[in-house]
Image: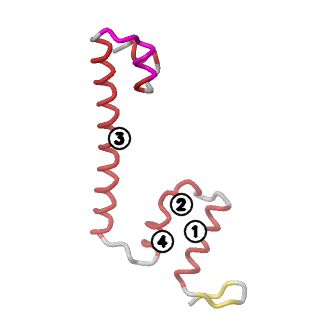
């Protein structure tokens, strides 16, 4: 238990308040907003190597999927261009900049 404003609160609630205060005052705001649960787990000693590996694995999967989507869009755009499709239409369909499509 810790004391805050003459009130006794448990450590977890206190840490949540501290992290929320940091976010609201923009002290590492972006980092804490994205990683709040992980930071709290570390501070509360609930973080284990298994948890760290699981989170790294999930982040790797997300990154891989994002990169895979980007590659697939580029390949599709290149094939459309090779088939003679209008560059403007390709850019519109793929959400790629026209300059990118022109350079394929």
Q: Residue at x 48, y 71 (%)?
A: 40
Above or below 73: residue 7: below
Residue behind mark 2: 32
Residue behind mark 1: 19
Q: Position of residue 9 (x, y in %)?
A: 60, 87
- Horizontal side of residue 55 vs 92, given as left or right: left
In the picture, the disc for residue 53 is none
Q: Nearer the viewer, residue 58 or 46?
A: 58
Query: How far is disc 3 from disc 4 in space, using C-alphas?
Result: 27 Å
Q: Residue at x 52, y 56 (%)?
A: 31
Q: Residue at x 41, y 12 (%)?
A: 87
The nearer-to-camera label among 3 and 2 is: 3
The part of the image, by quadrant, that contains residue 50 is: bottom left
User: Looking at the image, is mark 3 or mark 4 earlier in the sequence?
Assistant: 4
Bounds of the magenta segment? 84-92
Query: How far is disc 2 from disc 1 in space, using C-alphas?
Result: 7 Å
Residue behind mark 4: 40
The part of the image, by quadrant, that contains residue 57 is: bottom left
Q: Secondary structure at mark 3?
A: helix
Residue behind mark 3: 66
Asked if the residue at tag 1 contacts the one at tag 2, i.e. Cβ–Cβ closer than 8 Å, the answer is yes
Badge 1, how many Cα within 10 Å: few under 14, some, many 20+? many
């Amino acid at each position: 238990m810790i004391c805050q404003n003459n009130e006794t609160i448990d450590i977890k609630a206190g840490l949540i308040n501290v992290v929320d205060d940091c976010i609201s005052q923009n002290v590492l705001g972006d980092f804490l907003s994205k990683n709040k649960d992980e930071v709290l787990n570390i501070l509360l000693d609930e973080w284990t190597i298994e948890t760290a590996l699981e989170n790294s694995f999930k982040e790797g999967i997300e990154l891989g999927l994002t990169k895979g989507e980007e590659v697939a869009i580029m390949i599709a755009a290149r094939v459309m261009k090779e088939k003679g499709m209008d560059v403007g239409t390709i850019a519109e369909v793929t959400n790629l900049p026209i300059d990118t499509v022109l350079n394929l």
